[in-house]
Protein backbone atom coordinates (compact mmCIF):
# COMPACT_ATOMS: atom_id res chain seq x y z
CA UNK A 1 0.00 0.00 0.00
CA UNK A 2 1.41 3.37 -1.06
CA UNK A 3 -1.37 5.87 -0.42
CA UNK A 4 -4.34 6.44 1.86
CA UNK A 5 -6.71 9.08 0.54
CA UNK A 6 -9.82 10.74 1.92
CA UNK A 7 -12.42 12.31 -0.34
CA UNK A 8 -14.98 14.56 1.37
CA UNK A 9 -14.90 12.27 4.39
CA UNK A 10 -16.85 13.27 7.50
CA UNK A 11 -18.09 11.39 10.58
CA UNK A 12 -21.83 10.94 10.33
CA UNK A 13 -22.22 12.49 13.76
CA UNK A 14 -20.87 15.76 12.32
CA UNK A 15 -23.29 15.79 9.38
CA UNK A 16 -25.26 19.02 9.13
CA UNK A 17 -22.72 21.06 11.07
CA UNK A 18 -21.79 24.06 8.91
CA UNK A 19 -18.98 25.50 11.03
CA UNK A 20 -16.45 22.67 10.75
CA UNK A 21 -12.99 24.11 10.07
CA UNK A 22 -10.58 21.29 9.26
CA UNK A 23 -7.70 20.32 6.97
CA UNK A 24 -9.13 16.79 6.82
CA UNK A 25 -12.91 16.66 7.13
CA UNK A 26 -14.75 17.48 3.89
CA UNK A 27 -11.43 17.86 2.08
CA UNK A 28 -9.26 15.94 -0.40
CA UNK A 29 -6.38 14.50 1.64
CA UNK A 30 -3.69 11.98 0.78
CA UNK A 31 -1.20 10.27 3.08
CA UNK A 32 1.83 8.81 1.33
CA UNK A 33 4.17 6.02 2.28
CA UNK A 34 7.62 7.09 3.53
CA UNK A 35 6.28 10.39 4.86
CA UNK A 36 5.55 11.45 8.44
CA UNK A 37 2.35 13.30 9.37
CA UNK A 38 1.06 14.96 12.51
CA UNK A 39 -2.67 15.44 12.93
CA UNK A 40 -3.30 18.12 15.52
CA UNK A 41 -6.75 18.19 17.02
CA UNK A 42 -8.83 19.51 19.85
CA UNK A 43 -10.66 16.95 21.97
CA UNK A 44 -13.90 15.87 20.33
CA UNK A 45 -12.96 16.73 16.75
CA UNK A 46 -12.82 13.12 15.59
CA UNK A 47 -9.16 12.08 15.57
CA UNK A 48 -9.80 8.67 17.13
CA UNK A 49 -12.77 8.24 14.81
CA UNK A 50 -10.48 8.92 11.85
CA UNK A 51 -8.11 6.16 12.98
CA UNK A 52 -11.03 3.76 13.42
CA UNK A 53 -12.40 4.57 9.95
CA UNK A 54 -9.06 3.93 8.25
CA UNK A 55 -8.52 0.73 10.24
CA UNK A 56 -11.92 -0.53 9.13
CA UNK A 57 -13.09 -0.71 12.72
CA UNK A 58 -15.97 1.71 12.07
CA UNK A 59 -17.84 2.74 8.93
CA UNK A 60 -20.14 5.48 10.24
CA UNK A 61 -18.75 8.17 7.95
CA UNK A 62 -19.73 10.02 4.80
CA UNK A 63 -17.48 10.34 1.77
CA UNK A 64 -14.80 7.97 0.53
CA UNK A 65 -11.61 6.48 1.97
CA UNK A 66 -9.30 4.71 -0.47
CA UNK A 67 -6.20 2.55 -0.25
CA UNK A 68 -4.21 2.95 -3.47
CA UNK A 69 -7.31 4.34 -5.15
CA UNK A 70 -9.69 1.54 -4.08
CA UNK A 71 -12.66 2.37 -1.88
CA UNK A 72 -12.21 0.54 1.43
CA UNK A 73 -15.95 -0.12 1.66
CA UNK A 74 -15.31 -2.83 -0.96
CA UNK A 75 -12.90 -4.69 1.30
CA UNK A 76 -13.96 -8.13 2.52
CA UNK A 77 -13.32 -9.57 5.97
CA UNK A 78 -10.45 -11.56 4.48
CA UNK A 79 -9.03 -8.37 2.94
CA UNK A 80 -9.13 -6.59 6.30
CA UNK A 81 -7.45 -9.49 8.05
CA UNK A 82 -4.48 -9.24 5.70
CA UNK A 83 -4.41 -5.42 5.81
CA UNK A 84 -4.21 -5.45 9.60
CA UNK A 85 -1.51 -8.12 9.57
CA UNK A 86 0.66 -6.75 6.76
CA UNK A 87 -0.18 -3.17 5.78
CA UNK A 88 -1.51 -1.03 8.65
CA UNK A 89 -0.42 -1.08 12.27
CA UNK A 90 -2.38 0.86 14.87
CA UNK A 91 -1.68 2.10 18.38
CA UNK A 92 -5.10 3.19 19.65
CA UNK A 93 -5.48 5.92 22.25
CA UNK A 94 -7.26 3.46 24.57
CA UNK A 95 -4.52 0.88 23.79
CA UNK A 96 -6.90 -2.14 23.70
CA UNK A 97 -4.57 -4.40 25.62
CA UNK A 98 -5.85 -7.45 27.49
CA UNK A 99 -5.49 -6.30 31.08
CA UNK A 100 -5.85 -9.82 32.54
CA UNK A 101 -2.83 -11.03 30.53
CA UNK A 102 0.81 -10.22 31.17
CA UNK A 103 2.70 -7.74 29.02
CA UNK A 104 4.50 -10.55 27.22
CA UNK A 105 1.32 -12.56 26.70
CA UNK A 106 -0.23 -9.52 24.98
CA UNK A 107 2.77 -9.27 22.67
CA UNK A 108 2.86 -12.98 21.90
CA UNK A 109 -0.80 -12.93 20.90
CA UNK A 110 -0.03 -10.37 18.20
CA UNK A 111 3.27 -11.89 17.16
CA UNK A 112 1.69 -15.32 16.79
CA UNK A 113 -0.49 -13.87 14.02
CA UNK A 114 2.40 -12.40 12.07
CA UNK A 115 5.50 -14.33 13.12
CA UNK A 116 7.36 -11.09 12.56
CA UNK A 117 9.56 -10.93 15.67
CA UNK A 118 11.87 -13.36 17.39
CA UNK A 119 11.67 -13.76 21.17
CA UNK A 120 15.06 -12.09 21.45
CA UNK A 121 13.89 -9.04 19.48
CA UNK A 122 10.80 -8.68 21.65
CA UNK A 123 12.81 -8.90 24.87
CA UNK A 124 15.23 -6.28 23.53
CA UNK A 125 12.35 -3.88 22.88
CA UNK A 126 11.14 -4.29 26.46
CA UNK A 127 14.68 -3.53 27.64
CA UNK A 128 15.03 -0.52 25.33
CA UNK A 129 11.78 0.96 26.62
CA UNK A 130 12.76 0.41 30.24
CA UNK A 131 10.05 -2.11 31.09
CA UNK A 132 11.97 -5.38 31.05
CA UNK A 133 10.96 -5.91 34.69
CA UNK A 134 7.28 -5.74 33.67
CA UNK A 135 7.35 -8.57 31.11
CA UNK A 136 5.54 -11.05 33.36
CA UNK A 137 3.28 -8.54 35.12
CA UNK A 138 -0.40 -8.39 34.23
CA UNK A 139 -1.09 -5.31 32.12
CA UNK A 140 -3.89 -4.22 34.45
CA UNK A 141 -1.27 -3.71 37.16
CA UNK A 142 0.89 -1.41 35.03
CA UNK A 143 0.70 2.37 34.88
CA UNK A 144 -0.86 3.85 31.75
CA UNK A 145 2.55 5.07 30.59
CA UNK A 146 3.95 1.54 30.92
CA UNK A 147 0.95 0.22 29.03
CA UNK A 148 1.60 2.71 26.23
CA UNK A 149 5.08 1.26 25.82
CA UNK A 150 3.70 -2.29 25.74
CA UNK A 151 1.21 -1.16 23.07
CA UNK A 152 4.05 0.25 20.97
CA UNK A 153 5.92 -3.06 21.12
CA UNK A 154 2.75 -4.81 20.00
CA UNK A 155 2.33 -2.36 17.11
CA UNK A 156 5.89 -3.10 15.99
CA UNK A 157 5.30 -6.86 15.90
CA UNK A 158 4.16 -6.84 12.29
CA UNK A 159 5.17 -5.58 8.86
CA UNK A 160 3.39 -2.37 7.82
CA UNK A 161 3.19 0.25 5.10
CA UNK A 162 1.61 2.77 7.50
CA UNK A 163 1.59 3.00 11.26
CA UNK A 164 -0.96 5.12 13.14
CA UNK A 165 -0.27 6.31 16.67
CA UNK A 166 -3.21 7.97 18.43
CA UNK A 167 -1.80 10.09 21.29
CA UNK A 168 0.97 7.57 21.96
CA UNK A 169 2.90 9.51 24.65
CA UNK A 170 0.13 11.22 26.61
CA UNK A 171 1.42 9.64 29.84
CA UNK A 172 5.17 9.55 29.14
CA UNK A 173 7.91 11.94 30.19
CA UNK A 174 10.24 13.52 27.64
CA UNK A 175 13.00 10.95 28.08
CA UNK A 176 10.74 7.96 27.52
CA UNK A 177 9.03 9.75 24.64
CA UNK A 178 12.39 10.21 22.94
CA UNK A 179 13.27 6.54 23.40
CA UNK A 180 9.93 5.61 21.86
CA UNK A 181 10.69 7.91 18.90
CA UNK A 182 14.04 6.22 18.30
CA UNK A 183 12.60 2.72 18.42
CA UNK A 184 9.69 3.68 16.18
CA UNK A 185 11.80 5.41 13.54
CA UNK A 186 14.31 2.58 13.38
CA UNK A 187 11.50 0.25 12.35
CA UNK A 188 9.81 2.81 10.09
CA UNK A 189 13.02 3.39 8.15
CA UNK A 190 13.62 -0.34 7.89
CA UNK A 191 10.19 -0.85 6.34
CA UNK A 192 9.99 2.40 4.34
CA UNK A 193 6.65 3.06 6.00
CA UNK A 194 4.48 6.12 6.48
CA UNK A 195 3.74 7.46 9.97
CA UNK A 196 0.58 9.24 11.11
CA UNK A 197 0.54 10.62 14.66
CA UNK A 198 -2.45 12.28 16.29
CA UNK A 199 -2.22 14.71 19.18
CA UNK A 200 -4.26 17.15 21.24
CA UNK A 201 -1.07 18.77 22.50
CA UNK A 202 1.80 16.50 23.51
CA UNK A 203 3.23 14.61 20.56
CA UNK A 204 6.19 12.54 19.41
CA UNK A 205 9.12 14.78 18.45
CA UNK A 206 9.58 13.62 14.86
CA UNK A 207 10.63 15.42 11.70
CA UNK A 208 7.13 15.79 10.28
CA UNK A 209 6.73 16.24 6.55
CA UNK A 210 3.29 17.74 7.05
CA UNK A 211 1.14 18.94 9.92
CA UNK A 212 -2.62 19.03 9.43
CA UNK A 213 -5.31 20.26 11.77
CA UNK A 214 -8.46 18.32 12.37
Image (cartoon, rainbow, N blue to C red):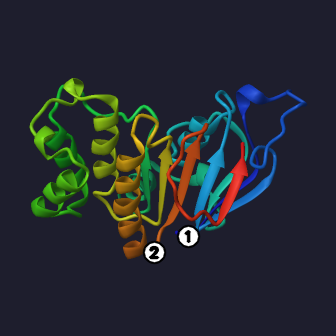
Q: Where is residue 200 in the image (x, y as percent from the top left)?
A: 61, 37
Q: Is mark 1 on a helix, strand or loop?
A: loop
As drawn, is 208 to the left or to the right of 205?
A: right
As drawn, is 156 to the left or to the right of 140?
A: right
Q: Distance between the residues labelled 1 and 2?
A: 7 Å
Quadrant the C terminus occupies: top right
In this rendering, the answer to whether 156 lies above or below 149 is below
Mark 1 Cα-neighbour bin, 10 Å: few <14, some 14–19, many ≥20:
some
Question: Which mark is drawn over residue 168?
Answer: none
In this rendering, the answer to whether 193 lies above or below 29 is below
Nearest the eye: 141 or 82: 141
Q: Residue at x 68, y 56 (%)?
A: 211
Residue for badge 1: 33
Counting residues from the start of the chain, the first of labels 1 and 2 encountered is: 1
Nearest the eye: 77 or 164: 164
Q: Which residue is drawn at 78% across and 49% down?
A: 23
Q: Where is residue 37 in the image (x, y as percent from the top left)?
A: 61, 59
Residue for badge 2: 192
Nearest the eye: 110 or 202: 202
Amino acid sequence: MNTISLQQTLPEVFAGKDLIVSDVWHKEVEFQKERIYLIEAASGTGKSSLCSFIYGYRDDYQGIICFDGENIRKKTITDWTEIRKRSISMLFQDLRLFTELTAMENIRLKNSLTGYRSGKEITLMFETLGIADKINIKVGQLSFGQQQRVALIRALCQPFDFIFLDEPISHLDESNGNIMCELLMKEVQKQGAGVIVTSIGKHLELNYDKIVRL
